[in-house]
């Protein structure tokens, strides 16, 4: 590593601490956050999160995390660098009685990344910032039919980094906002149908449609190709 022989003989790789009180929970350490496919999906990193129930049908999740993977004791919370954080909030609401019958989720994500690499990764990086919003709808209202659809929009800005500019006059990039969406459906045509020798068969029809354009995605700022997918 960078410290060579001066590096500590023992270091902290990852840890996790959870506190539960009633319907509320607080987590500290290595966490996983995000359920939106294009905005942020199960991003793992060091930080703090909070989740709670709001009444009979609502729930809220909030997270603040480091923008890259880190180790060690110096940045124990993952939030020690102000311009190197991800902030996320998701509100979910059950529109109909019954868990998962018809659920709407609204997410907001704001991220900034300083020119720092992940632990044990050698790369040339630059400063980035982005803000995104997402909607997700899940439904099992119709028996046998499951629907999962979402839309997200994200604005990306690649700020000028003096170290990469090297004293040259660069043309600043334009902040642009892009959108993405997806729809997944599955319908059980035949479920546990018994036939010869008491054997059962199950037939499910699936349909998937998805469109992703460049620079839409999680605030870790990973480049995605423009794509449109439909499949029966």
Image (cartoon, grey):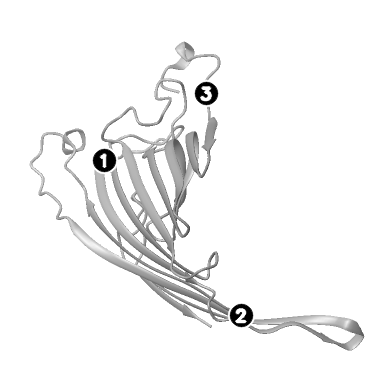
Q: Is residue 220 visible?
A: no
Please rate how many residues cluster around mark 3, counting C-alpha atoms within 10 Å: few if below 14, some from 14 to 19, many from 20.
few
**Residue 18 place in picture, x, y as percent:** 53, 34
| Extreme residue toward the left, this view | 169
Please report contact status of discs 1 and 3: CB closer than 8 Å, yes or no: no
Q: Quadrant of residue 210?
A: bottom left
Q: Of marks 1 and 3, which one's residue comes earlier in the chain?
A: 3
Q: Is residue 85 above or below residue 35?
A: above
**Residue 167 place in picture, x, y as percent:** 11, 34
Q: Is residue 165 above or below residue 133?
A: above
Q: Is 129 on the left or on the right of 137, as rendered?
A: left
**Residue 178 place in picture, x, y as percent:** 26, 64
Q: Pick whichever, 101 or 155, lies toward us.
A: 101
Kindly report which numbered mark, 3 or 2, lies closer to the viewer in this rendering. Answer: 2
Q: Of marks 2 and 1, which one's residue comes earlier in the chain?
A: 1
Q: Pick whichever, 188 or 113, lies toward us.
A: 188
Kindly report which numbered mark, 2 or 1, lies closer to the viewer in this rendering. Answer: 2
Q: Is residue 57 above or below residue 33?
A: below
User: What residue is rendered at 49% in x and 36% in y?
Assistant: 27
- Write down the residue under mark 1: 126
Q: Pick whichever, 172 or 108, lies toward us.
A: 108
- Write down the residue under mark 2: 144
Q: Is residue 207 visible?
A: yes
User: What residue is rendered at 33% in x and 34% in y?
Assistant: 116
Measure how far apart labels 2 and 1 are at the Cα level. 48 Å
Please rate how many residues cluster around mark 2, counting C-alpha atoms within 10 Å: few if below 14, some from 14 to 19, many from 20.
few
Please rate how many residues cluster around mark 1, counting C-alpha atoms within 10 Å: few if below 14, some from 14 to 19, many from 20.
some
| Residue at disc 2, secondary structure | loop
- Write down the residue under mark 3: 12
Measure how far apart labels 3 and 2 are at the Cα level. 47 Å
Kindly report which numbered mark, 1 or 3, lies closer to the viewer in this rendering. Answer: 3
């Amino acid at each position: 590593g960078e410290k060579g022989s001066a590096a500590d003989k023992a270091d902290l790789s990852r840890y996790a601490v959870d506190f539960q009180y009633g319907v509320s929970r607080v987590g500290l350490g290595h966490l996983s956050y995000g359920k939106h496919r294009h905005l942020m999906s199960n991003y793992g990193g060091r930080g703090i999160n909070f989740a709670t129930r709001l009444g009979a049908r609502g729930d809220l999740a909030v997270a603040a995390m480091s923008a890259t993977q880190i180790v060690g004791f110096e940045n124990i919370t993952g939030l020690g660098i102000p311009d190197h954080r991800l902030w996320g909030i998701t509100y979910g609401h059950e529109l109909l009685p019954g868990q998962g019958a018809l659920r709407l989720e609204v997410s907001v994500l704001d991220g900034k990344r300083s020119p720092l690499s992940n632990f044990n990764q050698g790369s040339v990086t630059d400063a980035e910032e982005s803000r995104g919003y997402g909607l997700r709808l899940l439904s099992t209202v119709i028996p046998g039919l499951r629907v999962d659809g979402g839309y997200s929009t994200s604005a990306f800005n690649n700020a000028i980094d003096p170290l990469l500019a090297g004293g040259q006059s660069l043309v600043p990039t334009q902040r642009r906002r892009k959108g993405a969406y997806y729809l997944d459906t599955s319908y059980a045509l035949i479920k546990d149908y018994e036939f010869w020798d008491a054997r059962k068969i199950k037939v499910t029809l699936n349909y998937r449609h998805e469109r992703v354009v460049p620079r839409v995605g999680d605030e870790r700022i990973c480049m995605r190709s423009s794509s449109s997918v439909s499949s029966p």
